[in-house]
Image: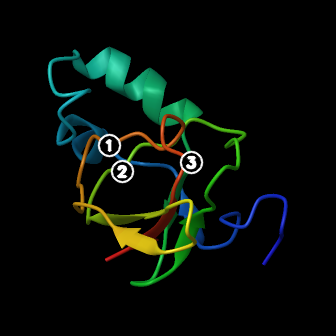
Amino acid sequence: MNEKYPFDSGHMRQPSIDELAAVPMFRSLPARELEDIAARFTLREYPQGAVVAIEGQRLPVFNVILSGRIQWYWTDEDGRQLKLTPEGPGVTLPTRRSVASRS
Protein backbone atom coordinates (compact mmCIF):
# COMPACT_ATOMS: atom_id res chain seq x y z
CA MET A 1 0.00 0.00 0.00
CA ASN A 2 1.25 3.46 -0.90
CA GLU A 3 1.15 5.67 2.24
CA LYS A 4 0.69 8.87 0.22
CA TYR A 5 -2.23 7.49 -1.78
CA PRO A 6 -3.25 4.26 -0.01
CA PHE A 7 -6.24 3.53 -2.20
CA ASP A 8 -4.30 3.37 -5.48
CA SER A 9 -4.63 -0.40 -5.58
CA GLY A 10 -7.66 -2.37 -6.64
CA HIS A 11 -8.93 -3.57 -9.98
CA MET A 12 -9.27 -0.65 -12.42
CA ARG A 13 -11.40 -0.21 -15.55
CA GLN A 14 -13.55 2.39 -17.31
CA PRO A 15 -17.10 2.60 -15.91
CA SER A 16 -20.02 1.79 -18.20
CA ILE A 17 -22.70 4.34 -19.02
CA ASP A 18 -25.23 2.15 -17.20
CA GLU A 19 -23.10 2.16 -14.04
CA LEU A 20 -22.89 5.96 -14.11
CA ALA A 21 -26.61 6.36 -14.89
CA ALA A 22 -27.45 4.32 -11.78
CA VAL A 23 -25.79 6.91 -9.52
CA PRO A 24 -28.17 9.67 -8.35
CA MET A 25 -25.83 12.55 -9.25
CA PHE A 26 -25.53 11.32 -12.88
CA ARG A 27 -29.04 9.88 -13.37
CA SER A 28 -30.55 12.86 -15.23
CA LEU A 29 -27.67 13.33 -17.67
CA PRO A 30 -28.12 12.48 -21.35
CA ALA A 31 -26.23 9.50 -22.77
CA ARG A 32 -23.67 11.72 -24.56
CA GLU A 33 -22.64 13.41 -21.32
CA LEU A 34 -22.45 10.04 -19.58
CA GLU A 35 -20.14 8.83 -22.38
CA ASP A 36 -17.89 11.87 -21.84
CA ILE A 37 -17.77 11.29 -18.08
CA ALA A 38 -17.09 7.56 -18.51
CA ALA A 39 -14.15 8.36 -20.79
CA ARG A 40 -12.59 10.55 -18.07
CA PHE A 41 -13.24 8.29 -15.07
CA THR A 42 -11.39 5.23 -13.88
CA LEU A 43 -13.45 2.76 -11.93
CA ARG A 44 -11.66 1.03 -9.05
CA GLU A 45 -13.09 -2.05 -7.43
CA TYR A 46 -12.11 -2.91 -3.87
CA PRO A 47 -12.65 -6.01 -1.78
CA GLN A 48 -14.87 -5.78 1.29
CA GLY A 49 -12.97 -4.23 4.20
CA ALA A 50 -10.38 -2.43 2.05
CA VAL A 51 -9.27 0.99 3.32
CA VAL A 52 -9.94 3.54 0.58
CA ALA A 53 -9.22 6.81 2.41
CA ILE A 54 -7.36 7.91 5.53
CA GLU A 55 -8.64 10.46 8.04
CA GLY A 56 -7.24 13.96 7.44
CA GLN A 57 -5.76 13.15 4.03
CA ARG A 58 -6.70 15.24 0.99
CA LEU A 59 -7.66 12.98 -1.86
CA PRO A 60 -5.86 13.76 -5.14
CA VAL A 61 -8.80 12.76 -7.38
CA PHE A 62 -12.59 13.06 -7.37
CA ASN A 63 -14.14 9.84 -6.05
CA VAL A 64 -17.76 8.71 -6.35
CA ILE A 65 -19.20 5.48 -4.96
CA LEU A 66 -20.92 3.75 -7.92
CA SER A 67 -22.02 0.58 -6.16
CA GLY A 68 -21.71 -1.07 -2.80
CA ARG A 69 -21.45 0.78 0.48
CA ILE A 70 -18.72 2.65 2.28
CA GLN A 71 -18.36 2.65 6.04
CA TRP A 72 -17.03 5.86 7.57
CA TYR A 73 -15.09 6.07 10.82
CA TRP A 74 -14.18 9.18 12.76
CA THR A 75 -11.61 9.42 15.54
CA ASP A 76 -12.56 11.76 18.38
CA GLU A 77 -10.15 13.91 20.40
CA ASP A 78 -9.75 11.07 22.95
CA GLY A 79 -8.62 8.67 20.22
CA ARG A 80 -11.83 6.64 20.18
CA GLN A 81 -12.92 5.45 16.75
CA LEU A 82 -16.60 6.10 16.05
CA LYS A 83 -18.47 4.19 13.36
CA LEU A 84 -20.71 6.49 11.29
CA THR A 85 -23.68 5.60 9.11
CA PRO A 86 -22.69 3.63 5.98
CA GLU A 87 -23.42 5.30 2.65
CA GLY A 88 -23.89 4.03 -0.89
CA PRO A 89 -24.00 5.10 -4.54
CA GLY A 90 -23.56 8.79 -5.25
CA VAL A 91 -21.42 9.58 -2.20
CA THR A 92 -18.26 11.54 -3.00
CA LEU A 93 -15.03 11.05 -1.07
CA PRO A 94 -13.23 14.41 -1.47
CA THR A 95 -15.58 16.09 0.99
CA ARG A 96 -14.96 13.51 3.70
CA ARG A 97 -12.07 13.42 6.13
CA SER A 98 -12.54 10.02 7.71
CA VAL A 99 -11.11 6.54 7.53
CA ALA A 100 -13.36 4.67 5.15
CA SER A 101 -13.66 1.01 4.39
CA ARG A 102 -15.93 -0.69 1.91
CA SER A 103 -18.55 -2.75 3.71
Q: In the figure, 27 relative to 22: above or below? A: above
Identify the coloring: rainbow
Q: Mark 2 points at which residue?
A: 65
Q: Distance between the residues labelled 3 and 1?
A: 16 Å
Q: Mark 1 points at which residue?
A: 91
Where does the image place residue 40, in percent across and percent down from the top left? 57, 31
State the SS at label 1: loop
Residue 101 relative to residue 12: left or right: left
Q: Mark 3 points at which residue?
A: 42
Residue drawn 48% across and 44% down?
Answer: 93
Q: Quadrant of the C terminus?
A: bottom left
Where does the image place residue 34, in percent across and percent down from the top left? 34, 25
> Which numbered disc, 3 or 2, marks the residue closer to the eye?
2
Indicate the quadrant where residue 35 lies: top left
Residue 93 relative to residue 77: left or right: left
State the SS at label 2: loop
Q: How far apart are marks 3 and 2 (CA)?
A: 12 Å
Residue drawn 29% across and 39% down?
Answer: 20
Q: Nearer the viewer, residue 16 or 1?
A: 1
Q: How far apart are marks 2 and 1 (CA)?
A: 5 Å
Where does the image place residue 74, in percent across and percent down from the top left? 46, 61
